[in-house]
Image (cartoon, grey):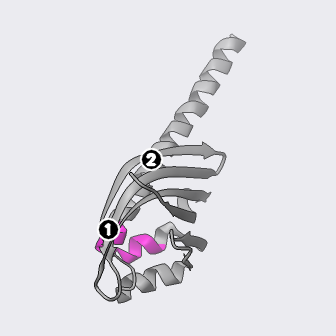
Amino acid sequence: MRILLFGFLLLSFVSFGQKDEATVDQLHRKKFNWLINKNYDSLNQLLHEQVNYIHSNGWVQTKKEVIEDLKTGKLNYTQIEVIEATTSIYKNTAVVSGKGRFRGLMPDKSEFNLSLFYTEVYVKVGKEWKLFNRLATKITL
């Protein structure tokens, strides 16, 4: 009986972990669409108040700066393609590691087209996942 109970509890923890992994993976993909479509309210809700949003050139943004730079056009994504992504959960923290192609326009309207490896750290605040840290590095795909 104890073995059966232990197995059930273990299965419950695994399924909750898989559910959180799927939730964070979907959220991280939605974030890219929100960046392209400039969904400020969704981004405002997703980004943690203390987020460090670090671009591949070393540019670091706060939550306020990410949203303001999207509004002004300083940050302007036109297409983001996730090539691959994996999500790992540890307690109330999720880490997403992915590769993708990022296209957009610079403030002078010149185009950029980057292949990036990125790592995103999400923390669970109450029942919501918040993006706490993001770091991108240029790669060749």
- CA gap between label 2 and label 1 equals 18 Å
| One can see residue 85 in this view | yes
The residue wearing badge 2 is 85
Which kind of residue does numbered mark 2 sit on?
Answer: Ala
Instruction: Give the secondary structure at mark 2.
Output: strand
Residue that appears at 61% across and 58% down: 123
Classify mark 1: residues with Cα within 10 Å, few (<14), some (14-19) or many (20+): some
Give residue 72's position: percent from left, percent from top. 37, 89
Q: Tell me where residue 111 sits by quadrant.
A: bottom left
Q: Which residue is mark 1?
A: 103
Residue 28 inside the magenta-drawn segment:
no
Inspect the magenta stretch and tell me whether residue 40 lies in it: yes
Q: Residue at x 60, y 22 (%)?
A: 8
Give the quarter of the image for residue 133: bottom right
> How far across and how far down the image is residue 109, in percent?
28, 85
Q: Which mark lies nearer to you, 2 or 1?
A: 1
What residue do we see at 52% from left, 73% from top?
57
Q: Which residues are magenta?
A: 34-44
Graded by Cα atoms within 10 Å as few (under 14), some (14 to 19) or many (20 or more), the crowding at tag 2 reads some
